[in-house]
Image (cartoon, helix red, strand yellow):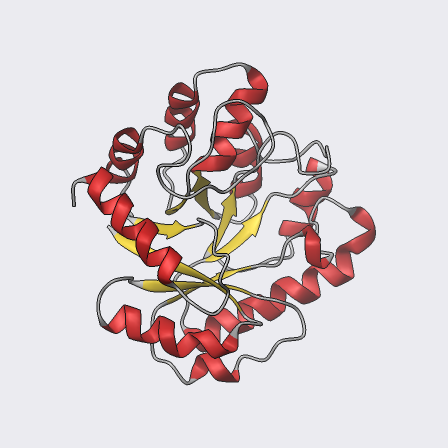
Amino acid sequence: MKFGLKLWSKNKDLIGKADKLINEKKFHYVELFYVPGTEIKPFLEHNIPYIIHIPTEKFGLNIGDKTKKEFNLKIINTCIKWADKLNAKYIIQHADYGSLDYAKNLLKDVHDERIVIENMPKVGINGEKMLGYEPEQLKELMSVGNFGFCLDFGHAVKTSVNMGRDYKEYINELLKLKPNMFHISDCDLKNEIDEHLNVGEGELDFKFLKECILSAKSGYVTLETPRKNLNSFNENLNNLKKLKVLFEL
């Protein structure tokens, strides 16, 4: 099992600390969220494993929005170039929201098999009807370019809450898509809106999540727990410690 540290590309001053944690074998890779307009140079100076995360709607990118094709492709191709230069293992793309057909058409112009499609919660933070929250839609998106799959446990749980289903049964359905990697945090089972809680602050069964990860061929697991102090990774280390206790590692 390989644990990933989430870092936004605007937080370039933290890459040295991340490098140290990886060399100490506390974490195994950096999942680098590309913020448009930032420079790659600080990250090239550190020879560590990377996974790239393509920007989300917060930064204007949405593959389901037919009015944004040129912008979407420009940003996605920039992320592919970053992945090339950093020798990234995967490139994560949110399924976003809007038109499934348009999202599929856009992905036909994306030529990189390192792309992994991340499942969404059924309902977005602002009430959007998201794409790629259920297996059939994910299959359609993945099949466009022989793309992989990033299983976000929190998103899957929130979808199950919305649908009134048992979250373990729902996650087991998503596991049939053979995830290449995972996103993990805690959350509650009371509301359908995405949230990222510290390990142990929610209601998830982490022993079940461990078995899910072990059932996959690839054990890449990025922690998506909150970090209030943006200049320190202490909260990440605390969450990793709790996770390893629950995982009995």
Lateral position of residue 67 relative to residue 171, left or right = right
At which x and y percent is residue 102? 73, 42
Q: Residue at x 52, y 46 (%)?
A: 117
Q: Residue furthest top?
A: 164
Q: Residue at x 40, y 72 (%)?
A: 87
Inspect this view and state whether residue 82 appears. yes
Q: Nearer the viewer, residue 57 or 108?
A: 57
- Placement of 47 over or under 208, stated as above or below: below
Q: Quadrant of residue 168?
A: top left
Lateral position of residue 6 relative to residue 246, left or right = right
- Placement of 64 over or under 170, stated as above or below: below
Image mark count: 0
At which x and y percent is residue 164? 54, 14
Q: Nearer the viewer, residue 234 or 108?
A: 234
Q: Residue furthest right?
A: 67
Q: Quadrant of residue 44?
A: bottom left
Inspect this view and state whether residue 113 appears. no
At which x and y percent is residue 93? 56, 51
Q: Residue at x 43, y 30 (%)?
A: 174
At which x and y percent is residue 28? 29, 62
Q: Nearer the viewer, residue 197 or 136?
A: 197
- Placement of 8 over or under 103, stated as above or below: below
Q: Quadrant of residue 179?
A: top left
